[in-house]
Amino acid sequence: MAAKAQSIVHVFPGVEQGVGEQSAQSPSLILLLGWMDAPLSLLMKYVEGHHSLYPTSTVVVVESYTSFMWSSTAHKEAKLLPVINILLEQIYKADRPTVGLLVHAISNAGAIHLMTLAGFLRDRLRKDPSVLRESIPAIRMAFIIDSTPGTNDYESIITTFTLTMGPVAKLAARLPLTLGYLAYYMVYNTLLGNSPLLPRLHSYLGQEQLLPGSNGKEPRLYIYSDTDAMVPFASVERHLSVLSAKNIPFTAEKYLGTQHVSHARKDPKRYWGAVAEVWRKALDQSKPTIKAKL
């Protein structure tokens, strides 16, 4: 049974049995950040997938809504406060040893939520008097980056909003969407001085450290497709080339013929096998003892 914390954060505890070897090899916490406007019923498929691999792990789901992207910083922090507190209590300031954190961000929206969350966490930890010299014990982590990062070009944005429409509806929607696209850039970016979200996302994912407590060498798994109409494979592969140039470790699973965020449904054995492998790589890394920057 899920315990819902506010409107966009849902907590799904693991089973209490099997606390021996199984618990010692499972993430203490799995953070699942969903794609734009994804219903909880679909995100539950991913919760079930994680619990099939790690039945003792707690899965925290963060839902994504369009309005979140354009809301104020205070509103975003309020919406993410439940997951911020969970991470602080169970990972960053846990009074017992933790196995680590597995992060699963789906689509641009999920990754943007992760980017936003990272900033709030960093600020909270820096203000905490128990955190000295802007460093904390490094935490074992692994990251799954599914169907992101995409591009900020016009056609990709239009496709995002019209993907499920029929031909007539797509044609009718193009003009208002185009006007909205232009208005957004004029007001949100030009007049208000905000940098575009997707270039910021590329920059964020191009860093070594995605969350506080990272040692910069955590394994990452990128999952994408050659036929994703919303996130072109060329955009993902440009990002991967940046990681390669920086010697940031990652593995990539490129699917053929699958659409946006449908890779797990198309080939669940391959998908969840890759998830298990990226966490195994995190376990194979020796327990971090160095201090990690905030």
Image (cartoon, grey):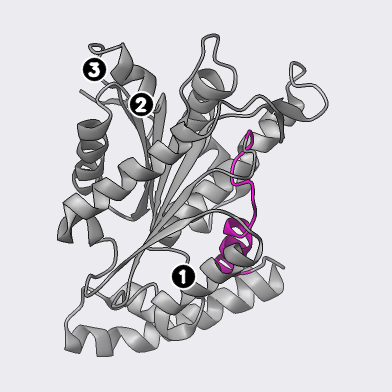
Q: Is residue 198 magenta?
A: yes
Q: Nearer the viewer, residue 84 or 78?
A: 84
On the image, the x and y values in percent for residue 281 come to 44, 40
Q: Residue 26, labelled with which disc? A: 2
Question: Sequence-wise, which precedes: disc 2 or disc 1?
Answer: 2
Horizontal side of residue 243 vs 293, given as left or right:
left
Other-residue count near label 2 (Cα within 10 Å), few / some / many at <14 / 14–19 / ≥20: many
On the image, the x and y values in percent for residue 107 come to 39, 59
Res 103 visible: yes
Q: Residue 191, labelled with which disc? A: none
Q: Are marks 1 and 3 in contact (CB under 8 Å)?
A: no
Q: Nearer the viewer, residue 204 or 218?
A: 218
| Res 155 quadrant in image | bottom left
> SS for tag 2?
loop
> SS for tag 3?
loop
The region drawn magenta spans 196-213
If the image is split into quadrants, where does the C terminus sit?
top right
Q: Are marks 2 and 1 in contact (CB under 8 Å)?
A: no
Q: Amino acid at mark 1?
A: Val
Q: Which residue is mark 1?
A: 236
